[in-house]
Amino acid sequence: MQSDIGGARPPQRDSWRWLGDVWYRLLCGLLVLAIVILLIPVSLQIISRHTELIPGYIWTEELARLMFIWTVMIGAMVGMRERTHFVVDVWPNLSPKANARLELFSGVGILLFAAVFVYGGWQFTEFALYRISELAELPLWTIHMAWPLLGLTWLLFQGEHMIDMLRLAAGTVPQAD
């Protein structure tokens, strides 16, 4: 089996990575659930707009917005773990060690960006702690909490990836079983 990093064998999983694995599986399930829930208010809006079968519910717009935000944020978290959200292959012919060094360099930027999301997102959430939405009376912190959670998840998943890249750059990648 070959990894996508220049033909190197995939690194052996550390025992502490079970947290990332469990969190990733939970996020995948939540992403499916968020999309299903998003379909409900959007469907109600479409049906009420084009037929007289049901009245036009105003709260559906707020619920659709909340679920859309969470769907995007959870998708970004999953994309970070799968390495599909931020990866642009500019130099495809680099050696595995050179590619690992380049990934470490770009990974520092991602970690900084994630830290901004944690810090700024927490302030954003504190601002909305005692506020509610106008129509559906949803607590606004449930929307705003997506930003610091996104940052923490990126820190976890990018940290895992950077440990792998450090090992690869140092030439200490253990052989997979």
Image (cartoon, rainbow, N blue to C red):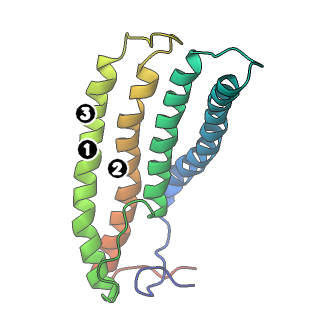
From this view, report whether residue 88 is shown above or below residue 131.
Answer: below
Label 3 crowd (10 A; few <14 / some 14-19 / many >=20): some
Mark 2 is on which residue type? Leu
Compared to residue 88, the image places residue 38 above or below, namely above
Front-most of residues 22 and 122 = 122
Please count the marks in the image.
3
Can you tell which mark lies on residue 115? 1
Please name whichever residue, 13 or 154, is drawn nearer the observer in this view of the structure. 154
Q: Secondary structure at mark 1?
A: helix
Among the 4 quarters of the image, the one containing residue 149:
top left
* Residue 16 in view: no
Disc 1 to disc 3: CB gap under 8 Å: no
Amino acid found under the numbered disc labelled 3:
Gly
Asked which secondary structure carries label 2, the reply is helix
Badge 2 vs badge 1, beta-carbon distance below 8 Å:
yes
Image height of 46 relative to 72, above or below: above
Indicate the secondary structure of the residue bearing disc 3. Answer: helix
Viewer-side residue, 103 vs 19: 103
What residue appears at the point 38 percent right and 64 percent down from the top-left corner? 161
The circle drawn on residue 26 is none
Which marked residue is nearer to the observer: mark 1 or mark 3? 3
Q: Residue at x 68, y 26 (%)?
A: 44
Sequence-earlier tag: 2 or 1: 1
> Which residue was labeled with disc 2?
155
Residue 85 picture location, percent across and down:
42, 59
